[in-house]
Amino acid sequence: MSGFLPYGRQTIEDDDIAAVTEALRGDFLTTGPTVEAFETAFAAKVGAQHAIAVSNGTATLHLAMMSLGVGEGDVCIAPSVTFLATANCARYVGAEAVFADVDPDSGLMTPDTLARALSRVGDKRVKAVLPVHLRGDVCDLPALKAMASAAGAVLVEDAPHALGSIGTFGGVEHPVGDGAYSSFASFSFHPVKTLATGEGGMLTTNDAELAARARLLRSHGMVRPAGGDPWWYEMPELGFNYRIPDILCALGLSQLAKLDRFVARRRALTALYAERLAERCPRVRLAQSPAHSNPALHLLTVLIDFEAEGLSRRTVVDSLKSQGIGTQVHYIPVHRQPYYVNRQGLADLPGADAWYKRCLTLPLFPAMADGDVERVVDALAAILG
Ligand SMILES: *Cc1c(COP(=O)(O)O)cnc(C)c1O
C-alpha cells in the first residue's frame, strides 16, 4: 500500500460492498433477519452459546453492566491502560470504577495487579472485574476469575482487540468470547478493530438469562406479553435503543467470513516486524505476550525507552508522520483522566505509567504489504540512529 500508512484501518473488499448493497435492497434495514444471522455466525465462530449484536462497543459494555444489575454503591475494576469506555460503563450505571495497574511490559491486568486493586476497594461491593485483552493478548482468565469469584464478582471481558485470539488454559484452547471464564465478552467493530461495520459491537455469553436481559435492554426494555392485543407492549424497566441495523450486520457477516485470513495476515506482518526490528532497531522491543496467549494481534505496540534514546516520543511521532507513517499511543492511562482524578484523586499505578512512557503503536492492518513493514522499520531505524 502506497501513500499514508495509518496505524490501523478496515479492509473492505468488493464482496463486502455487494453484501451491503443486497441488504439495502431487502425488506429490512433494521430489526430484520440479518441481525440474527450475524449473531448466530458470530456465536459459532467464538464458541459461545449466545451473541447479542449492538450499536457499538461502548453500548455493549453498558448493556453488560445493566444486565448484571451493577448499580449505585457497587465497584467495577478496570485496568488503567485501556480505552475510556471500559471504566466509563461502570459510571453509566452509577457504580464506581477502581483502576487496576498493569504489567509494564505487556500492558495487561494480571492476578498481581488485580490483587492490589482489590485491596484498595475498601468495604464497597465489587460486582465486576473487566480485564482488557490489550493488543489481542489474552489475560490470565482462570486466575482472574478465581480472584473475582472470591470477591463475589464476575468477569466481563472487554475484548475488542481480541477477536480471533486464543488463550490456552489447562491444556485447553479457548477462543476469546467462548465465555468459559466470564459472564460476558464485549467486542467492537469500529473500523480500526479486526472486523469493521463502521460502528457496531457484540456481546457474547453462555448464560441464557443474561442474554435475554441484554436483548430486552437493547431495545427500550419493551416486551410484548403473550396473548396481548396486537399493538400492545409494556416497559417493565428502562432500556435504550442500542440496536444495530441489518445493513451493518450484512457487512459484519461478510467480514466475519474473512476473520481467519485477516488474523493470519496480522500474524505474518507481526512476525516480519519482529524479525526486522531485532535486526535494525535492537533496543526497540515488542510488547510482551504471556505464554498462554496466542493473540490475533490487533495492535503492533512497541516499547521504546525514549529517555535513553535521547528523543522525545513527540519527535519520533512527528518524524514518522512526515514520512507518511501513522502511529498511536495505546493508551493514556485512564486513571489520569481529569474526570477520574476529580472523583477519586490520583491512584499510584507505576506499571501503567511505565507502560505509557514507552509505548508506541506502529501500522498494522491486513492490507499492508511486506514492503510497508520494511518502510516503517527503516524509518524508525533512521530516527533512532
Ligand atoms: C474500541 C474499544 C471500545 C469501544 O468500542 P466502540 O465500538 O468504539 O464504542 C472499548 N474498549 C476497548 C478496549 C476498545 O478498544
Image (spheres, rainbow, N blue to C red):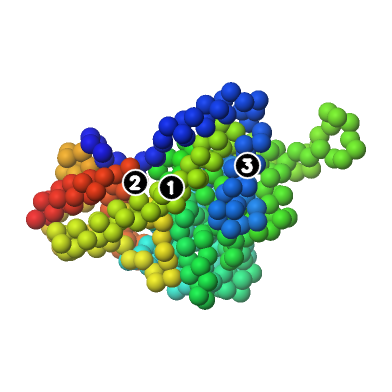
Q: Amino acid at mark 1?
A: Thr
Q: CA distance from mark 3 to mark 1?
A: 19 Å
Residue 184: x and y in percent read 60, 57
Q: Residues within 10 Å of mark 3 (few under 14, many from 20)?
A: some
Mark number, residue 110: none
> Which residue is painted at 47% across and 62% down in the image?
166
Q: Is ligand 1 closer than 8 angstroms to the Cβ of mark 3? A: no
Image quadrant in which the N terminus is located: top left
Residue 341 position (above or below residue 278): above
Give the camera-side residue of 304 and 100: 304
Residue 281 position (above or below residue 316): below
> Which residue is painted at 71% across and 49% down in the image?
213
Give the mark nearer the N terminus: 2 vs 1: 1
- Residue beneath disc 2: 365
- Closer mark to the observer between disc 3 and disc 1: 3
- Closer mark to the observer between disc 2 and disc 3: 3
Helix, strand or loop at mark 2: loop
Q: Amino acid at mark 2?
A: Phe
Q: Amino acid at mark 3?
A: Ala
> From where the camera sits, is residue 226 visible?
yes
Q: Are marks 2 and 3 in contact (CB under 8 Å)?
A: no
- Residue beneath disc 3: 37
Mark number, residue 194: 1
Residue 286: x and y in percent read 28, 61
> Which residue is painted at 42% across and 40% down in the image?
191
